[in-house]
Image: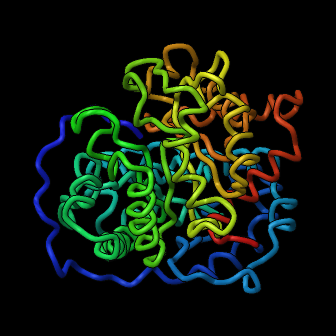
């Protein structure tokens, strides 16, 4: 997600950092799901007693023939449990106990770890959180490198995208992505909201700036693919951002509404990495990479709503670019492009109705009022049952929970 923090000069990545194996037990977790999902359906999202442990998904690609069918898993879930899987809530890394209780009580699909999360990502704290989830819990962070990284206090600095592109070959960037991915997964991070595929059309210290691999669409595509492939080799689910392109926007969506160039111009430049990487035959078009949608006003595409809340944006991604993987929103709870107009429950409903599979907010809490509103929206027909099931299926497939 965008950030306005000035960029320091990143030190080089330390070689030979600890190379931990991916956390094991994904298959056991998937089988556990089959056993416990009926209990979730019967009891809603707050089951009695301690839930059965669900190990985090490992980096191992299990293959669809070794996983339960999503149709059966989703059919066994209650409406509230399905909706909970579509939420990714920010948690306080310094308060593992509250995080664990949030997961136990709500059964959200994912948690977002911001800041330098040394307490939550050390010892057994995160494992205790994951044990509260009946369905494997996605643990997401935006560990891009440079001024946006999360485990540097634990495992060392990662250079910014721009620094990597200036100093390294794509193959070397892939190796950096692999090494970092192993470190992330060993800490319990299963999803990285990276790489940034925005084109760097603004100075290095602006909202995107040096978070971009460059100004040329082909170079950005090449380096972003390399970083993502390294991460995926390690077993981390990657997410391209910020669709449909924040690099040439006229401001910072943390601070208010921002406008990009018209859609026709984005197609010729900012949208090309998505087409090349995620389109038919693209190197990342295999279900192990998602897309994060930004809060942008796009002439010729959006109407009165930011892109994360506008159905036309999701149609563009699904129809024009043929993408059928996981789609998340940018932060709905701490960016004024959204919070200046919408309360969180309203924003989440708009985003899910528009076509997002998961709604993300980093500010934490407020899960119960959000879920209450979503259940009402489903009952009232503002959220369709079939699109809801399809979104839950994409969430579960991204976790390798079902096929």
Q: How many numbered marks does the figure carry? A: 0
Where residue 53 sits, quadrant-wise, is bottom right
- Of 156 and 8, which appears nearest the observer? 8
- Of 114 and 102, which appears nearest the observer? 114
Vertical position of residue 220 compared to residue 22: above or below: above
- Of 394 and 134, which appears nearest the observer? 394
Where residue 8 sits, quadrant-wise, is top left
- Of 182 and 345, which appears nearest the observer? 182
Name the side, left or right, on which 170 lies relative to 233. Answer: left
Vertical position of residue 308 compared to residue 357: above or below: above
Q: Percent from the top left, x then y, of residue 376?
A: 80, 29
Name the side, left or right, on which 163 lies relative to 242. Answer: left
Q: Quadrant where the C terminus lies? A: bottom right
Name the side, left or right, on which 334 lies relative to 237. Answer: left
Q: Percent from the top left, x then y, of residue 362?
A: 44, 38
Vertical position of residue 373 compared to residue 185: above or below: above
Q: Quadrant where the N terminus lies? A: top left
Residue plotted at (13% across, 64% down): 12
Residue plotted at (49% across, 61% down): 238
Residue plotted at (27% across, 60% down): 165
Q: Percent from the top left, x then y, of residue 83?
A: 72, 44
Colour logic: rainbow
Residue plotted at (38% across, 84% down): 21
Q: Percent from the top left, x then y, of residue 88?
A: 55, 46
């Amino acid at each position: 997600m965008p950030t306005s923090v000035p960029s320091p000069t990143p030190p080089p990545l330390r070689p030979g950092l600890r190379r931990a194996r991916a956390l094991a037990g994904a298959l056991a977790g998937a089988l556990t799901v089959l056993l416990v999902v009926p209990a979730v359906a019967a009891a809603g999202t707050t089951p009695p007693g301690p839930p059965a442990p669900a190990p985090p998904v490992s980096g191992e690609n299990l293959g669809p023939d070794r996983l339960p069918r999503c149709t059966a898993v989703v059919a066994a879930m209650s409406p509230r449990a399905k909706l909970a899987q579509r939420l990714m809530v920010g948690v306080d890394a310094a308060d593992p106990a509250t995080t664990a209780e949030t997961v136990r009580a709500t059964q959200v699909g994912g948690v977002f770890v911001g800041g330098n999360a040394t307490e939550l990502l050390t010892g057994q704290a995160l494992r205790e959180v994951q044990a509260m989830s009946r369905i494997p819990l996605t643990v997401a962070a935006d560990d891009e490198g440079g001024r946006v990284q999360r485990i540097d206090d634990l495992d060392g600095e990662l250079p910014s995208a721009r620094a990597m592109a200036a100093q390294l070959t794509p193959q070397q960037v892939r190796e950096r992505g692999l090494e970092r991915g192993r470190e992330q997964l060993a800490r319990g991070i299963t999803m990285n909201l990276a790489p940034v595929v925005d084109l760097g059309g603004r100075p290095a210290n602006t909202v995107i700036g040096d978070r971009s691999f460059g100004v040329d669409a082909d170079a950005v595509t090449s380096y972003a693919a390399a970083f993502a492939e390294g991460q995926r080799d390690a077993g981390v689910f990657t997410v391209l951002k910020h669709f449909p392109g924040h690099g040439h926007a006229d401001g910072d969506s943390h601070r208010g509404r921002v406008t990009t160039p018209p859609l026709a111009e984005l197609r010729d430049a900012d949208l090309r990495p998505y087409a090349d990487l995620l389109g038919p035959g693209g190197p990342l078009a295999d279900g192990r990479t998602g897309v994060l949608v930004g809060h942008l006003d796009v002439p010729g595409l959006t109407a009165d709503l930011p892109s994360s809340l506008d159905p036309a944006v999701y149609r563009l991604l699904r129809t024009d670019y043929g993408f059928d993987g996981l789609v998340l929103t940018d932060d709905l709870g701490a960016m004024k492009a959204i919070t200046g107009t919408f309360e969180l429950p309203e924003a989440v409903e708009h985003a899910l109705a528009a076509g997002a599979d998961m709604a993300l907010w980093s500010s934490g809490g407020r899960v119960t009022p959000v879920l209450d509103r979503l259940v009402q929206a489903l009952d009232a027909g503002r959220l369709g049952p079939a699109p809801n099931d399809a979104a839950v299926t994409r969430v579960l497939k991204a976790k390798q929970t079902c096929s």
